[in-house]
Amino acid sequence: MSESEEKVGLLTATGQKWKIQLFIFCNVIAMLVMLYGLVFQEKNHMFVIFFGFVLFFVTFIWVNFSIKCPECGCKWHWWAISKKDSKLHRKWLAIGSKCPACTKDFNSDL
């Protein structure tokens, strides 16, 4: 790869960036649903709050198991949040280029 070529992150290089975007979107919806349940405390407000929590929890589990290395199956999102510093895991997913398990460089395939 020449210096003029721009490096892309793991998610972009492997076509998995949409999974993080969907996760963020679902988190915003879950937060709004829970806020609605708290503010408008209607008859079933606890159900609404619980639904928002379940939506968040399900998407969190889904993103941890779905973002993975196409070569070795290493679950990158789970690896990042469990092994990287809390301030660095999102940055590593955005700009990292090598799988931590199999060390395949996904920028070399571009």
Image: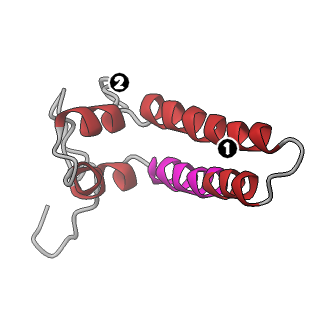
Q: For the image shown, how many numbered marks are present on the structure?
A: 2
Where residue 84 sits in the image (x, y, percent)?
Answer: 17, 41
| Apparent side of residue 43 relative to residue 101 in the rendered image (left or right) | right
Tell me the residue at 14%/61% (across/down): 1
Q: Is residue 101 above or below residue 21?
A: above
- Amino acid, disc 2: Gly
Asked which quadrant contains residue 104, the reply is top left
Question: Looking at the image, is mark 1 or mark 2 nearer the viewer?
Answer: 1
Q: Which residue is mark 2?
A: 73
Q: Is residue 26 magenta?
A: yes
Secondary structure beneath label 2: loop
Tell me the residue at 73%/60% (across/down): 39
Q: Which residue is mark 1?
A: 52
Quadrant containing the C terminus is bottom left
| Apparent side of residue 104 relative to residue 26 in the rendered image (left or right) | left
Where residue 35 sits in the image (x, y, percent)?
Answer: 67, 57
* Residue segment shown in magenta: 16-30
The rendered magenta stretch, by its main secondary structure, is classed as helix
Assess disc 1: are there few (<14), some (14-19) or many (≥20) residues with their C-alpha within 10 Å of its C-alpha: many
Q: Is residue 20 magenta?
A: yes
Q: Nearer the viewer, residue 46 or 56?
A: 46
Q: Residue furthest right?
A: 43
Task: Tell me the tag on residue 95.
Answer: none
Where residue 99 sits in the image (x, y, percent)?
Answer: 21, 37
CA distance separating discs 1 and 2: 30 Å
Q: Residue furthest left?
A: 3
